[in-house]
Every structure is written in structure tokens, then in C-alpha cells.
Amino acid sequence: MPETIELWKSEELSPIRDKVYNYIKQAIVQGIYKSGERIIERELADQLQVSRTPIREALFRLESQGFVKTLPRKGVVVSKLSPEEVIEIFTILSSLESLAVKLAAQNANESHIEQLERLIRKMEEELSHSKSDEVSTSFHFETYDIICEAAQSPRLKQMLDGLSDYIRSFVQLGYELPGRKRKAAEEHLQQAKAVRGREAEQAEYITRIHLENSKKAYLEALNKE
């Protein structure tokens, strides 16, 4: 798979155990390994040309973090979140991200505003020339990065970063629904404009709407797996 080759190359400078761990985790987060899919140590070791020891260590770490689980007579499989777990995580995200955009609207400096201006122009340009599902998925993370920085709250960013792997997997699966990529980009555009205009309450409202729509999209996609 081209995606897995790129993931492996991106970890070239890491120690082998970290390289294997990050590779498998990102393959799960990016949807290369699907929920319920088996991860076979021998095949993965052959593919990555490493011994089975770092594969085993990586899978043990990932199981302790909830990314995979070991099933009798089946082996290691990618974990599938229950609808209740998804709702719980989105509830936490809604509270944290709403606070982040509110603080960003209040605390953003000139550099942050300039970054938002550039991002807004880029989003408007792409939305005006792209078809529904040809919009870049990078807008989510670009908006998120600027807002977290503009909020100027290191502890809040640390909490959000702790959920970043869940966020990425939610985004990847939710975007499989027709039209969701474009709708999400439009929501991020509104979010960025509200923060740029220092409209804290509006930014907070848009963020809650965006996350509610993202939750619904993810749950719908999850049910189709």
C-alpha cells in the first residue's frame, strides 16, 4: 500500500521500537487498518522487514491504550469504539474545543490573525473551485493548530493533544460520508472567521455545531462498517 510506505518513511529517524509503534498507530488512526481488522505479527514483520519483537512490543502498548485488543482464536484486532464511547469522547471534545476557540478569539495576537487570514483565503479559494468531495481534509488540522496556539493555554492544548489520535480517526471515517468533507470545511471557515473577528460567543457556537455534525457523521459511518 502506498500509504503504508509513506508512513514508514516518515519514521526513518526514530528508534526501531518507536518507529514500529508510531507506524501501526498512525495506520489505525488514518483508517489504513479498519475497525475489527486483524493485525498479524508475522505478516507485519515481513512487510516492515523487522523482527517480531518490536511488533509484539508495539501491539502491547497499543492494547494498553485501547487501539487494539486480543480476541480468543482470532488474535490482535483493531478496536472498534462503541457508540457510547464515541458520544463520551465528543462530549469532552465539545467542551475543550469550545473553550479553545473562545480563548483564541480573546487572546489571538497579530501573528495569529494573519495566519487565520491566510487560511481563510485558502479555504475560500478551494471551496469556490472544488466539487463536494474534492475539498482538502487538511483544513481541520490547520484550523485546529492555529486556534490552539492563539488560545495561549498550554494546559488546554495538552488536554486536546491527548485526544488528537481519536480526533484524526473520527475525521477520517466521518469524511467517508458523501458531502461531509465540504460541509466540514465550510464549518471551519465560519469558525476561523469568528475567531478572526474576535466574536468569542459565535466561535464557540459554531464549534459546538461542527462537533455535533462530526459526531453524527462518524456514528453513521461507524454503523456502515
Image (cartoon, rainbow, N blue to C red):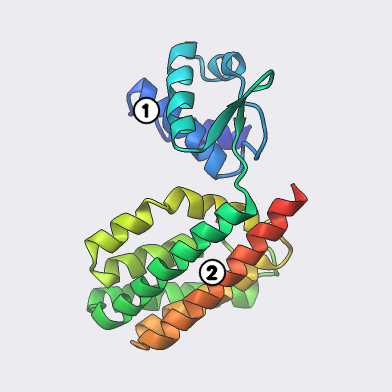
Q: Secondary structure at mark 1?
A: helix
In the image, residue 58 sits, relative to residue 79, either above or below, namely: above
User: Where the N terminus falls, by quadrant?
Assistant: top right
Quadrant of the image occupied by residue 210: bottom right
- Would residue 93 be found to the left or right of residue 213 on screen? left
Mark 2 residue type? Leu
Q: Which residue is mark 1?
A: 18
Tag 1–tag 2 contact (CB < 8 Å): no
Outermost residue, right side: 224
Mark number displayed over residue 211: 2
In the image, residue 70 sits, relative to residue 93, either above or below, namely: above
- Would residue 215 be found to the left or right of residue 20 on screen? right
Quadrant of the image occupied by residue 133: bottom right
- Would residue 163 be found to the left or right of residue 181 on screen? left
Q: Position of residue 80 (x, y in %)?
A: 62, 42
- Disc 1 vs disc 2: which is toward the camera? 2
Residue 120 visible at all: yes
Figure disc tally: 2
Mark 1 residue type? Asp
